[in-house]
Amino acid sequence: MLTAIEGLHHVTSMAADARATDAFFTRTLGLRRVKKTVNFDAPDVYHLYYADGAGTPGSVMTYFPFPHIARRRRGAGEVATTAYAVPPGALPFWAERLAREGVEGLASGERFGEPVLAFEGPDGDEFALVETPGDARTPWQADGIPEDAAIRGFHSVALRLKDATPEAELLRFMGYEEAARDGTVTRLVRAGGNGAHRIDLESVAGAPPARLGAGSVHHIAFAVPDRDAQAEVRRAIAAEGFNVTPQIDRDYFWAIYFRTPGGVLFEVATDEPGFARDEDPAHLGEALKLPAQHAHLRERIERQLVPLD
C-alpha cells in the first residue's frame, strides 16, 4: 500500500465558454483565479485554475474551455460530482446565493450524515457543497461571501462506475480505506489526508458509457509532496500493471497519468513548485502565463483568446 498520497491535488474539467466559467468560479463561488495559462497541447485554448488564495493542493479546480464543444453525456466511467467543503451552518447562505445567481440543479440533502447542497455549473457540471466540521483550511476572501461560509477546498469527488470493485481495490492500494456505505455509494478516505481526502464510488451497472464534453471532468489528480515521492508512486503503480506516463513538467507541478479499471483518468501531481513560481503571490492569475514551448506564439495566442476580467 502506498503512503505518499495526501488526497486530491486538483480536478480538471472541460467547458464551452471561458468567460462564463471564469465568472462562475470567481464571482458566484468566490474562488480565486490563481493561474491563467494555456493548454500544453492546444495553446489556443485556455487552462484556467481556481482555488484558495495560494492555489493549495486540494483546492484547485482547473478548466479547458473549448469553444463550440458539445455538452457531455452522463453515464458510467466518469467523475460525477466534485464536492467542496464549507463550514457547518453555511448551506442556507449558499442556497440563497446560488438561487439568486440563477444557478440550476439546486437540491438539498444528506449523505453519510453530512448536509449537502447539490448544484450545477454553467455546462451542467455536477457540484456539491458539504458542511464539514473541523476543516481548518483558510479560504479565499471574496466580496459578498463571509468567512464563516466560504469554500475551504475540495471535500470529495464521486466516481460513477459500472463496477466499483476494481476502482476500490486500486484506491486501497493508493492508501485509501473504506469508511462507509450509503446504498450504492462507497466512501473511501485517506486517513490523515489534506482535507480533500475522500473518494465516493457509485455503482451504476445499467448506465450507458459517459461521453466527454462540456461539463465533463477530464481527470482528477492526487497530491504527493515532491518528485521523489511521485517516482515511488509511479514505480508501484506500474508494477501493478498500469500503463503510467513518465514524469511530465506542467510548470506548476510535475505529473504522471494512468487510466483506471473503470475508465477514469488519474493523475498524481507534486505539491511543488506551486503557482507562485512565475508570479508574485499578490497577483496570481492576472497575467497570461505561457509554457516555454509556446512563448514565441504569444502575439497570436493573445489575439485568439477571449479577454477575461
Image: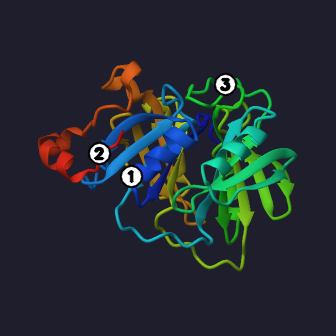
Residue 180 percent across, percent down from the top left: 84, 50
Residue 266 percent across, percent down from the top left: 52, 53
Q: Is 172 located above or below residue 201 in the figure?
A: above
- Between residues 284 and 98, which one lies in front from this camera angle? 98
- Between residues 169 and 270, which one lies in front from this camera angle? 270
Residue 177 percent across, percent down from the top left: 76, 45
Residue of label 1 = 18
Q: Quadrant of the C terminus?
A: top left
**Which element type, helix, strand or loop, lies under badge 3?**
loop
Residue of label 2 = 307
- Earlier residue among tags 1 and 3: 1
Residue of label 3 = 147
Q: Quadrant of the N terminus?
A: top right
**Which element type, helix, strand or loop, lies under badge 2?**
loop
- Circle 3: is it few (<14), some (14-19), or many (20+) Cα within 10 Å? some
- Circle 1: is it few (<14), some (14-19), or many (20+) Cα within 10 Å? many
At 31% across and 41% down in the image, what residue appears? 37
**Which element type, helix, strand or loop, lies under badge 1?**
helix
Mark 3: which amino acid? Glu
Residue 6 numbered mark, or none = none
How far apart are the two marked residues, 2 and 1, measured between alpha carbons? 9 Å
